[in-house]
Amino acid sequence: MLHITMIGCGAIGVGVLELLEQDPQLCVDAVIASAGSAELVRQRLASFRQPPQVLTALPADARPDLLVECAGHKAIEEHVLPALERGIACLIVSVGALSEVGLVERLEAAAARGNTRIELLPGAIGGIDALSAAKVGGLDSVDYIGRKPARAWKNTPAEQLCELDSLSEPTVIFEGSAREAARLYPKNANVAATLSLAGLGLDRTRVTLIADPLSEDNVHQFQARGAFGGFEMSLRGKPLPANPKTSALTVYSVVRALGNHAHAISI
Ligand SMILES: NC(=O)C1=CN([C@@H]2O[C@H](COP(=O)(O)OP(=O)(O)OC[C@H]3O[C@@H](n4cnc5c(N)ncnc54)[C@H](O)[C@@H]3O)[C@@H](O)[C@H]2O)C=CC1
Ligand SMILES: O=C([O-])CC(=O)C(=O)O
């Protein structure tokens, strides 16, 4: 059995815990919550058969087999970097955090010192295997369009650009590099960062973000061109009821990745 500590217990974290209750090979022993939300998280977990322990940091003597981040950009610096230094393998969904200049190198160095690895999960997007394989042969362009219902852009810079509540047609709220998208939209542009890190990099991947009052889904589209040929992907993700910014596929992506670490066959 694999012993897991999870960072963050919001929409993704709870969804993952619910699904993992059915897998005897995976056990989430502990959840790391932010100090202000630990009590709320304990209440959230009270109905679970075996509720994980709720902590605010990884204890110095803790040695989980895996640490999985489902919290947000700040958790990478706060929890993931020190865990890598201690030799704990980490999986993360807040891939947009790696848009901060120098963080990729610091994560690599910490993992090297700890003789361990960090795994960037595909989350709400698919096709990362094909894109990163295509990169080996050389890519010419990767263009990504992220389209979400207007409510998913609440509490983001999009509010300064348009009236989200009364939007009547799809509206472009961002055009630029994946690095800038991830910086401005930390809860909505992790996919843009993931595509970049798998493909042409954060500065050469072109990103368009759209607030679409006519869509109920989080739609992720990208096209890639290169020596391998061409590749178009369109994925319509259902948002999680607990967080309209986040697609349900992100939860499944975490469960799949953890299962691949525990099961005899990984796919
Ligand atoms: N790669 C991908 O495709 C996607 C990635 N994400 C990332 O996942 C993150 C979490 O998404 P949701 O669960 O929907 O958000 P949420 O807001 O429902 O839950 C996040 C939880 O993490 C906790 N948290 C925040 N910072 C923390 C820290 N430093 N230490 C411990 N706990 C902390 C919050 O208190 C909250 O309970 C997003 O912020 C985003 O960065 C989200 C959707 C897709
Ligand atoms: O969940 C999604 O659809 C994608 C998302 O929030 C992100 O890219 O940060």
Image: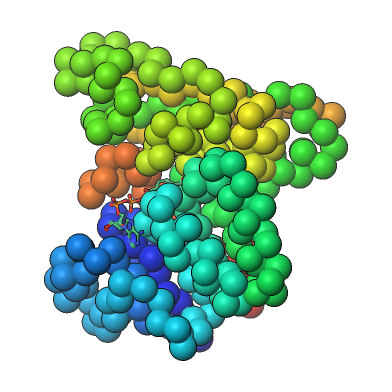
Quarter where residue 131 is shown:
top right
Q: Tell me if residue 147 can be seen.
A: yes
Quarter where residue 132 is shown:
top right
Q: Quadrant of the C terminus?
A: bottom right
Residue found 52% across the figure and 69% down from its top: 82
Q: Is residue 90 above or below residue 160?
A: below
Left or right: where 156 falls relative to 163? right
Q: Position of residue 134 (x, y in %)?
A: 77, 38
Q: Position of residue 182 (x, y in %)?
A: 48, 36
Count of numbered badges drawn on the protein: 0
Quarter where residue 239 is shown:
top left
Left or right: where 250 falls relative to 192? left
Q: Is residue 78 above or below residue 87?
A: above
**Of the pair 212 and 24, the residue shown nearer to us:** 212
Q: Position of residue 155 (x, y in %)?
A: 25, 33
Residue found 41% across the figure and 53% down from its top: 74
Q: Is residue 95 above or below residue 53?
A: above
The colour scheme of the drawn protein is rainbow
